[in-house]
Image (cartoon, rainbow, N blue to C red):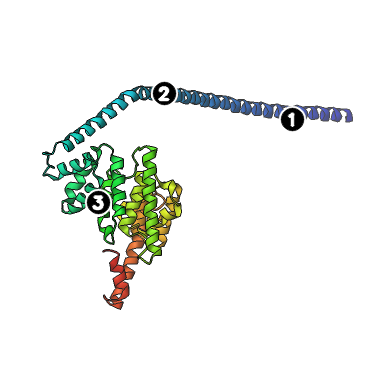
Amino acid sequence: MATDVAHADGIQNAFDCLEAQHTLISNCTLLWKNLSDHFSSLRQTLADRSQDIDSQIQALDADTEETLESLDLREASIPDRESTAAALIQDRQDAVLAEIKTPDVKPPDDLPGLLRWYCRRMDSAGLWRFVVSRRRDLAILRKVIGQAVAGSVDPARLVVDAVADFLDHQTSGGADRCWALGMLLRSLLDSEGRKAPKVSESMREKAAAVAEAWKEKIGENKEGGGEGGMGGSEAQLFLQMVVAFGLSSNFEEELLKKLVLEHASRKEIGKLARGLGFGEKMADIIGELVKNGKELEAVYFAHEARLTERFSPLPLLKSYLQSSREKADAILKDGNNSIAATSYGSQFL
């Protein structure tokens, strides 16, 4: 009897052992299947990524080849373009010399013709004075001055010489004439007023010397007891000069930033700020404007710098509206002739 029980226990233990081994084998099989599926997935992922990289390499090779072909074509066309440009300059010089040598030739009577006449003759001093004298025809000037300047023998030199002559003859009322020089400088920029033209290094150095002389003259006026600093028109013209000839590296960044912040309310400053190469620091400038209560200017700067996602216009405009209401209430309370009313009203003059 005891033998049968012992025999039965042995059989049960054997079955338990077999069951344990069966469970172990099943777990190993499942684990192997999971590992196999995982590695298969990895292989497929690597294959897909490899194929994607191959496609990108092929696309890059194609783009590189296309770019190299384009560069080769441009390089091959340089002699022809140089010849064309030289011929154009020679034609313009010949036309100007023919006009000068012919005493009976009179200047045109129409405004566009007169502008072209001054530009063809490279009469920079006469050009900016003529533009100033025709301010009543501002709408026409804006339309035709770019084409007139472009028709000169050397547009960049014409404009730089005009600014230099303006600086040499600047008087206390010079700020009223800055718009004319600004129009000439704007004619050198792209349609958005940001991209500087391609000029020779010698011309860039000449423009830098004129701009530096301008900065020093402003400093002398300040030390001599004058009003000191640049007015809005002068600051805008100075910054246009810096942008037009890519002179940002010639001046301290703090100076350029100071001018931008002080005269941010002027329409052109937002466009010029982007052309000054502030880069990531444009966000700091916009932050300063917000901090100083210039939310409208901040909205415009954010739009020009393409930072509207970071500086959403709606909250800024709401803040400006709230601030305006508070100022209006304060003015109504203190009276229209109060200092606050005068100061607030002067912002819109």
Instruction: Tell us which disc is closer to us: 1 or 2.
Output: 2
The amino acid sitting under disc 1 is: Ala
Q: Is residue 333 above or below residue 305?
A: below
Instruction: Tell us which disc is closer to us: 3 or 1.
Output: 3
- Neighbor class of circle 1 (other Cα within 10 Å; few <14, some 14-19, many 20+) is few
Residue linked to disc 1:
20
Q: Is residue 257 above or below residue 157?
A: below
Mark 3 → mark 1, Cα distance in angstroms: 97 Å
Percent position of residue 97, x then y? 20, 35
The amino acid sitting under disc 2 is: Leu
Q: How many marks?
A: 3
The amino acid sitting under disc 3 is: Ala
Q: Which residue is nearer to you in this view: 83 or 50?
A: 83
Percent position of residue 130, x then y? 19, 50
Say if residue 274 shows up in the picture: no
Residue linked to disc 2:
68
